[in-house]
Amino acid sequence: MKRTIQVKEVPNLKEAAKRELNVKPEFIYQSVEIDDTMKSIGKNKKFFVRTYGCQGNLRDGEVIEGILARMQFEKTEDMNEADVIILNTCAVRENAEKKVFGEIGLLKKLKLANPDLIFGVCGCMVQQEHIVKRILETCEHVDLVFGTHNIHHLPTLLKEAYFSKERVVEVLSNQGNIAEDLPSIRASKTKAWVNIMYGCNKFCTYCIVPYTRGKERSRKSIDILNEVQELKDAGYKEITVLGQNVNAYGKDLNDISFAKLLEKIALIGIDRIRFTTSHPWDFSDELIDVIAKYDNIMPHIHLPVQSGDDDILRRMGRRYNSKTYLELVDKIRSKIKDVAITTDIIVGFPNESEENFENTMKLAEKVRYDGAFTFIYSPRVGTPAAKLKDNVDMKTKKERFNRLTDLISKIQLEIYKKYQDKIVYVLVDGYSKTNDTILSGYTEDMKLVNFKGNAKFIGQIVPVMITNCKTFTLEGEMVETRCLNNQ
Ligand code: 5AD
Ligand code: SF4
C-alpha cells in the first residue's frame, strides 16, 4: 500500500538560480532545536550515515551525525544494525547519482526486514526536482528527503517521519541561511574541516552546485575564528578551510577579505592550515602574500583550471583565459617557496574539438601539475551547458581523457621523483589503507607518504626520509625516533 507523503517543500531549480542582492541570509544561532519527545529517541538505537562527494558534503555528514548523537543515537559502521540510515548525496556528475540509486535499491531489503527503520536521503542530489520526483515515484521505502539548506531541521523532520508514518519531504530552494552552533562528530581527532562560506554565485555553465547549494554567503569571521580556536584547544593539528570558492569570502558581508581571514586563522597557531577551493578569477595578490608569509599555511594550492582552451573557458563561463591563468601560476610560484599546484580538468565539454583539447594538453604540460582530478563532462539537468547539442562521441571523449591522464601521471611521477632521499614532514593519519604495518599521512605540500613507523606517532608530525617515489605516493622511513613536536 502506498503511504501518504507529507510534502513541506520540494526543490525548484529556477527558484534556486535566483540571486537577489537585497535578500540577506539569516544567521541562525542555536540552530538545532530538539523537543522533549526527541531528546532520547535514539536511546539503544543506532545510525548509519554514508556521504558521497566533496569535502563540503563530508563536513555536512559530520553535522548530521552530531545531530543524531544529540538525540542519543549511537553511530554504527554496519548498516544492517542501523535504526536510522541516511545517504548524504552528491550531484556533480551522473556517476555519483547512479551509485546512490544503486544503493537506494539495495537498501529496500533492510526496510522490508525492519519496517521501523527510518531511511533518509539528503544532500545535493535531492535539491533537484526530477530526482525527488523519481525517489517519490519509484523508491517507496525512502521515508525522509531533505536538502542542503535545512540539515539543522533534522530533529523535527525525523520526529514527523517516526510518528506520522508518512513519507516526509522538505527541500528548500531559497538562497540559503547560515546555521550556527551545529553539533558534529568529526571524522578525525587531528584534522578538521571548517566551513567559512556556503553556496556559489559563479554559475559555470556545466555546474549544478550553484543550484544545489544556494547563494554565496559567508559565516561571520568571529564565528569561524572561535571554531578554529576550539579546534586548536582540542589538540587539532590541521584544519582545512572550506568553501565552493573561498576567494569570495566576506564579499557578501562587508567583513574581512579571505586573505585577512586566513591571516587571523594562521595567527591562532594551528600547525597546518589548508584551504579549498580557489577560483582563479578572484585569487588576490594579498592572498598570495599571506600564504607566503605564514609557515603554518601549507604550500599547496588547488587551482581548478577546467580547460586550457580559451574558447571552451569562455563557453564554460570561467571568467579567465589560459594566459591570465598561467600568469597567476607564475606569480604564485615566484612568491610561495616550493608550492605545489593541483587542479581539476573537465574533458569533453560539448563540441570540444581536437584543437581545443590539445590546448588543454599544452597547458597541463606548461604548468606541470603536482596532481589533477580529471573528469569526463557530465550533463546536469537545468544547467546552460546541458542544453547544448554535443557533436563529440563518448569514445573520443574517453580516448582524450586517457591521453590527458597519461600526461598528467607522467609529469606527476617526474615531480614525485625529486623527493628521492629528501626529508619531508608528515602528519600521520594512521595505518595505510592497504597495509596495517605501514603508517601513512601527508606532507606539507599534500603528497601521500607511506612509511614504516610506530603507531604511537599517529596524530603527530614526523620527519620521513623518502626512499621510493611512485606516481601517486611516496615511500620512506622515519628518521628520528622522537617526534618533532612532542619532544
Ligand atoms: N561534469 C564533469 N565534471 C564536473 N565538475 C563540475 N561539474 C561537472 C560536470 N557537469 C568538476 C569540476 C569541478 C569538480 C569539483 O567537479 O572540475 O571543479
Ligand atoms: Fe561550480 Fe564554478 Fe561554482 Fe566551482 S565556481 S562550484 S565549478 S559554479
Image (spheres, rainbow, N blue to C red):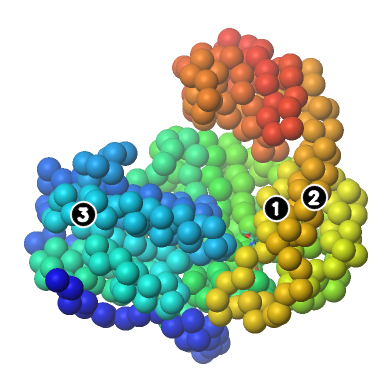
Q: Secondary structure at mark 1?
A: strand
2 and 1 marks in contact (CB < 8 Å): yes
* Label whose residue precedes the other's in the sequence (2 or 1): 1
Amino acid type at image mark 3? Lys
Quarter of image, res 426 = top right
Q: Report the Cα–Cα distance between label 2 and label 3.
A: 44 Å
Q: Residue at x 77, y 59 (%)?
A: 396
Q: Nearer the viewer, mark 3 or mark 1?
A: 3
Ligand 2 location (quadrant): bottom right
Q: Residues within 10 Å of mark 2 (few under 14, many from 20)?
A: many
Q: Decide if residue 179 is in sight here.
A: no
Residue 56 percent location from the top left of the image: 50, 57
Q: Which residue is mark 1?
A: 374
Task: Name the side, left or right, on which 66 lies relative to 360.
Answer: left
Q: Residue at x 38, y 53 (%)?
A: 103
Task: Name the side, left or right, on which 227 lies relative to 282.
Answer: left
Q: Which residue is mark 2?
A: 404
Residue 387 percent location from the top left of the image: 65, 82
* Label whose residue precedes the other's in the sequence (3 or 1): 3
Q: Which residue is mark 3?
A: 111
* Label whose residue precedes the other's in the sequence (2 or 3): 3
Front-most of 358 and 288? 358
Q: Is residue 441 above or below residue 152?
A: above
Residue 454 badge? none
